[in-house]
Amino acid sequence: MNHDTYSDTYIKAILDEVKTIALIGASANSVRPSYFVLKYMLSKGYEVWPVNPGQAGKEILGQTVYASLEDLPGTPDMIDIFRNSEAAGQIVDDVIASGHLPKVIWMQLTVRHDEAAKRAEAAGIKMVMDRCPKIEYGRLSGEIGWAGVNSRTLSSKRPALKAGFQHRGLKGTQKD
């Protein structure tokens, strides 16, 4: 797969399919990007399991923090990596070796490891690199356009709000 660009269909399918996310590198610091992503994905209806050995046993946004992927209550649908590229490569190798394969491994903005992506895809895991699920969700749902940001999606229709915020709003997005 070409990891320089992803089709909207590919990203949307992942975000629609995923229900549980292990967020590696989750931070309790409310100004860190991983905190924003955790908060946002929770607000969209995903079950998010924060992973941070320094915060293990504590809570972030009401979610129990786990020390490692091995400590999670199950196999997540997606692993979102907030670590550098070298660490991400090792995480991918550890995931493959564990045999507990998620549907998707997602590496955050600026995080890319092409060799690890090839190994994950060979194991049947979908890969996304150098992207943020929060940004992609907002862009694809039309939500990000409300602030005047170019979402690359043209429509004269504003997405319908549900219960005060866009809740899993990708499933019913218009195609115009």
Image: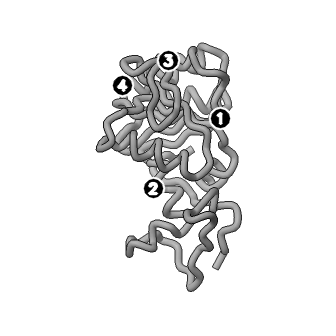
Q: Is residue 13 left or right of residue 86?
A: right
How many neighbours does mark 1 have within 10 angstroms: few (below 14), some (14-19), or many (20 or more)? some
Mark 4–mark 1 Cα distance, whole angstroms, equals 22 Å
* For marks 2 and 1 on the same chain, the one whose residue lies earlier in the sequence: 1
Quarter of the image for the N terminus: give it.
top right
Mark 2–mark 1 Cα distance, whole angstroms, equals 19 Å
User: Residue 155's x, y, as percent?
Assistant: 56, 81
Residue type at mark 2 is: Ile
Assign a secondary structure to mark 1: loop
Residue type at mark 1 is: Asp
**Are the two marked residues, 1 and 3, in contact with CB atoms closer than 8 angstroms?**
no
The residue carrying mark 3 is 68
Q: Toward the viewer: 15 or 64?
A: 64
Mark 3–mark 4 Cα distance, whole angstroms, equals 17 Å
Mark 4–mark 2 Cα distance, whole angstroms, equals 23 Å
The residue carrying mark 2 is 135
* For marks 4 and 1 on the same chain, the one whose residue lies earlier in the sequence: 1
Q: Residue at x 50, y 35 (%)?
A: 62
The residue carrying mark 4 is 86
The residue carrying mark 1 is 77
Mark 1–mark 3 Cα distance, whole angstroms, equals 16 Å
Q: Residue at x 69, y 61 (%)?
A: 171
Assign a secondary structure to mark 2: helix
- Displayed quadrant of residue 158: bottom right
**Are the two marked residues, 4 and 1, in contact with CB atoms closer than 8 angstroms?**
no
Q: Nearer the viewer, mark 3 or mark 4?
A: 3
